[in-house]
Image: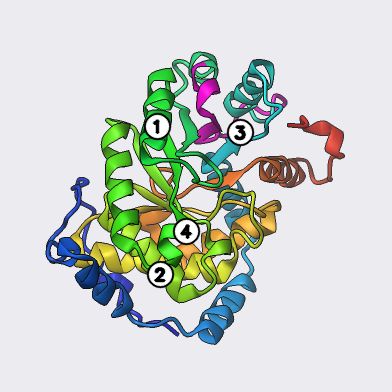
């Protein structure tokens, strides 16, 4: 298993500070220094990580806690549509669901954000005006990340100008896997600058990173470069948001806050479809980094079908019986 630091020793979160951060300001002085730092991070015991994740996944919660967990999970959803066939009408429909997930129960929480392609961010912004629901847009040649840096930066600026207040970028996995860590870092820094006031979620695409050690290294690159969130996946590659990957990324954000005082958010995305999946992640959050992250400002689910299952489970707790799938809208 990875090294474990006492969660009770976590300091309070401080306002975001952009990279480089002490005591890491010398880390990025050269490719060699950055590589030495990243490969000097404690190694991940894959068997131990999988065993710990499996153990956390078996935890059960009582009915009252389940009701709280379902409402919390709904409030953490980035309700997402990222298809080539997306239309303004579909985005407006998704925004309506984000504002009122269950029309039969006005006490149902709103979701955290609607996530779309950048060219539709303006449609989402208009549909969500005055609600406090964020507009997230994917950028940087999502999902492949295969474009020049100039194109990626233009993609980000276009999404922000269209109304996005959160940007979900993808890292250059080719650069990462060939050891060009400083290139990956510098690109994230440039994207963060292009975001302006918009928050930046950095997608690692963990299914392509091969090892949990690489997941840890990529997490640190993203955090040192100024990312506000680290995110597992695009949802276009399998495997996506597995519990062992989430555990390693959460340990990274925990250790980063201990070292720098800066709190980073975490977003698992891809393959999280059921209430049971969501609860497993909430338990892992609480046990690994503590309740400070049990807040939509610090934790999100990237999902579409998850919301429907949460709503059906919520209706079950409220009415005592399961509703059919026709009781929720099809996204």
Magenta span of residues:
103-122
Residue 25 position, x and y percent, is: 13, 61
SS of the residue under disc 2 = helix
Q: Alpha carbon of mark 3 to alpha carbon of mark 1: how far? A: 33 Å
Residue at the image point whose x is 34% and y is 32% from the top: 198
Q: Label 2: few (<14), some or many (≥20) within 10 Å?
A: many
Residue 92, by quadrant, is: top right
Q: Earlier in the sequence, mark 1 or mark 2?
A: 1
Question: Given this view, does label 4 or label 1 mark the residue nearer the observer?
Answer: 4
Counting residues from the start of the chain, the first of labels 4 and 2 encountered is 4
Q: Is residue 198 left or right of residue 138?
A: left
Compared across the picture, whether 274 is left or right of 181 comes to right
User: Left of 190 or right of it: where is 219?
Assistant: right
Say which element carries label 4: helix
Q: Are marks 4 and 2 in contact (CB under 8 Å)?
A: no
Q: Which residue is mark 4?
A: 174
| Front one among 308 and 139 | 139
Real-space CA distance between mark 1 and mark 2, rounded to the nearest whole angstrom: 25 Å
Q: Can residue 253 be seen in this snapshot?
A: no
Residue 221 visible at all: yes
Query: Which label is found at residue 108?
Result: 3
Q: In front: 233, or 275?
A: 233
Which residue has dot 1 on it?
Answer: 156
């Amino acid at each position: 298993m990875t090294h474990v630091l006492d969660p009770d020793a976590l300091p309070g979160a401080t306002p975001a500070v952009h990279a480089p951060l002490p005591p890491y300001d010398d880390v990025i002085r050269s490719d060699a220094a950055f590589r030495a730092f990243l490969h000097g991070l404690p190694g991940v015991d894959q068997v131990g990580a999988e065993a710990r994740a499996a153990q956390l996944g078996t935890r059960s919660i009582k009915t009252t806690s389940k009701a709280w967990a379902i409402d919390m999970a709904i409030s953490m959803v980035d309700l997402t549509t990222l298809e080539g066939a997306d239309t303004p009408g579909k985005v407006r429909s998704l925004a309506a669901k984000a504002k009122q997930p269950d029309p039969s129960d006005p006490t149902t929480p709103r979701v955290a954000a609607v996530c779309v392609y950048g060219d539709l961010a303006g449609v989402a912004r208009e549909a969500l005006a005055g609600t406090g629901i964020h507009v997230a847009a994917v950028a940087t040649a999502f999902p492949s990340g295969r474009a020049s840096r100039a194109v990626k930066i233009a993609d980000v600026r276009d999404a922000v100008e269209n109304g996005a207040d959160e940007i979900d970028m993808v890292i250059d996995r080719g650069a990462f896997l060939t050891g060009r860590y400083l290139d990956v870092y510098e690109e994230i820094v440039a994207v963060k600058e292009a975001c302006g006031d918009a928050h930046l979620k950095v997608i690692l695409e963990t299914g392509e990173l091969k090892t949990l050690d690489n997941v840890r290294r990529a997490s640190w690159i993203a955090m040192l470069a100024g990312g506000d969130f680290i995110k597992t996946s695009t949802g276009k590659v399998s495997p996506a948001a597995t519990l062992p990957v989430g555990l390693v990324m959460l340990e990274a954000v925990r250790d980063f806050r201990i070292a720098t005082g800066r709190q980073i958010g975490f977003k698992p995305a891809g393959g999280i479809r059921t209430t049971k999946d969501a609860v497993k992640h909430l338990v892992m959050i609480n046990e690994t980094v503590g309740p400070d992250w049990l807040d939509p400002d610090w934790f999100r689910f990237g999902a579409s079908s998850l919301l429907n299952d949460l709503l059906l489970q919520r209706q079950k707790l409220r009415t005592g019986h399961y509703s059919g799938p026709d009781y929720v809208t099809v996204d």
